[in-house]
Image (cartoon, rainbow, N blue to C red):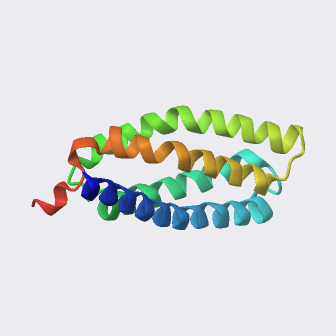
Amino acid sequence: MKNIKLKEFLRFLKYTLISSSAGLVEIGSFALLNEFVFKDKYWPSYLIALTLSVVWNFFLNRKLTFRSVNNVPVALLKILGYYAVFTPLSTILGNYLSDTLLWNSYLVTILNMLLNFATEFPFQRFVVFGKSVDSAQKV
């Protein structure tokens, strides 16, 4: 039991590191798009940056954190389901906070990233990869 808890804690740490790299992808692409392409229009910069970070995060975590040989198209459909809920809510909220209430768009993006981090790990761990976690070791 103690070994399982340690293994899951280490898995969470690895997920955190990989998600941090995805966060750098997201905030970096958001900054470039926000400053040079869309000129302070929150939602297009956020959507593109989120998409880039999702792809980065999914493939690295699938291979390195969850070590799953799960069917990739099925796993991607599950992630698409998660983002079908998360993306509209975070985009509408982010756009409202940034463009209506005039909050700093970088602060809003970081808050969305933290919310995404907190909700996506359990979703990926238990819904997307579930029983296929560590299945790549058995192959």
Outermost residue, left side: 139
- Count the numbered circles shown: 0
Image quadrant where residue 26 sits:
bottom right
Of residue 73 and residue 130, the one placed in the foreground of this image is: 130
Image quadrant where residue 39 sits:
bottom right
Of residue 136 and residue 75, the one placed in the foreground of this image is: 136
For the C terminus, the image quarter is: bottom left
Is residue 59 visible to us here?
no
Who's the residue at 42% across and 40% down the image?
Answer: 123
Residue 80, image x, y percentages:
43, 39
Residue 97, image x, y percentages:
81, 40
116 w.r.t. 8: above or below? above
Of residue 100 and residue 133, the one placed in the foreground of this image is: 133
Is residue 32 visible to us here?
yes
Q: Is residue 54 left or right of residue 129?
A: right
Q: Is residue 129 left or right of residue 114?
A: left
Who's the residue at 69% across and 54% down the image?
Answer: 110
Who's the residue at 62% across and 51% down the image?
Answer: 114
Residue 126, image x, y percentages:
34, 40
Residue 54, image x, y percentages:
49, 53
Q: Is residue 77 left or right of residue 30?
A: left
Outermost residue, front side: 2
Q: Is residue 54 left or right of residue 11?
A: right
Who's the residue at 49% across and 61% down the image?
Answer: 16
